[in-house]
Image (cartoon, grey):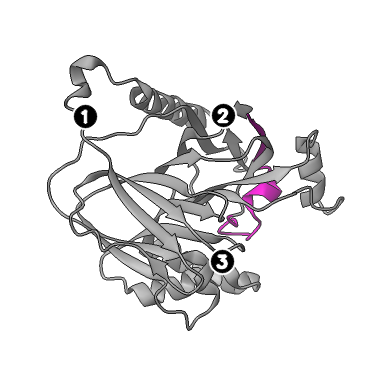
Amino acid sequence: MSTTVLRRLVVATVVAAATVGAVTPANAAAKQAPQHVSVTAQTDRLVAPAAATLRPGVTTFEVSTPDFGGREVGLIKLKPGVQLDNLLANLGTVLHNEDLEAKKAAGAVVYRDSVLLGGAIVTPRAPQIFSQMLFEGTYYLVDYRSLANPAATNHYQKITVGRGFNSYWPGVDHVVLQYQESNGDPRFRAPATIKSGARLLIINLTDQMADSVFLPVAPGTTGEDIAKFFQGQSAPPFIGQPQGALPASAGYAVHYKADLAPGRYVLLSFVGDRETGYPGAARGMYKIIDVV
């Protein structure tokens, strides 16, 4: 591991440690209630309040869906002067177009014009919860799955954050680091075992966007089995639907509650490299994790 990566890991660990501390009786009274936004991803529309009363600070989003195929709801902030429709058209190409060159060109626009702030992959089994630090301005909740249809409507919701400050900060059980080795290959640093419902602070220390997807695998599945799959040497080892946190831009973090059924999972990133298009998992960005 390079000195630069190590230094960034140390800084991230120090920052994370500062967020993990329990609330003491002395400051509990001053701790404000969390800001909460309920989001429902229907098959034909995204239902969420136009939360104009939000204040800067951490906001928690609880995402649910009745769609047995699952949905993906992400949080986006546009850079100045960018039109939402153009950004979503390019994001749809990145997510749903199989042409590698088209994906790379569209990805360059997404990197240039937006900041991705995480989100949740959700199934009807249980709502998924993620939290993000928001500042004054405009944000958009977007149903990423709906972007496969260029004619989709009602697939996003504008979120406005006003003035003031909410000092609430969610607790953290584990820190998950997304980082790069000295040769540029992306990796996860994460605990081997977590409890169902564990609160994860996911920090992206790479120079690209990265997601954190949990896919259930059979008991006894190893990292070698995952590597063989991505090398085309074995059948898919996955035995269920994905859940997890959607991509966050480089240098950003997202708080994710891992409400997962007990079992063995592989944590991986499907985001393609901005130069080659190869997904992070195919380059070694995966980690076997047991949920208890």
Residue 119: x %, y % from top left: 45, 52
Per the image, the residue denoted by label 3 is 95
Circle nearer the N terminus (3, 2) = 3
Task: Give the amino acid type for the residue marked by disc 2 in the picture.
Answer: Lys
For marks 3 and 2, give the CA distance.
31 Å
Magenta stretch: residue 272 in it? yes
- Quarter of the figure with the C terminus: top right
Q: Indicate the quadrant where residue 14 lies.
A: top left
- Quarter of the figure with the N terminus: top right
Q: Residue at x 33, y 67 (%)?
A: 157
Q: Which residues are magenta?
A: 271-292
Residue 268: x %, y % from top left: 63, 45
Location of residue 268 with respect to 222 vertically, above or below: below
Residue 199: x %, y % from top left: 46, 33
- Numbered disc 2: secondary structure: loop
Task: Give the amino acid type for the residue marked by disc 1 in the picture.
Answer: Lys
Circle 2 residues within 10 Å: few <14, some 14–19, many ≥20:
some
Q: How many marks?
A: 3
For marks 1 and 2, give the CA distance.
26 Å
Q: Indicate the quadrant where residue 201 lies.
A: top left
- Is 195 or 100 nearer to us in this picture? 195
Circle nearer the N terminus (1, 2) = 1
Proximity of marks 1 and 3: CB atoms separated by less than 8 Å:
no
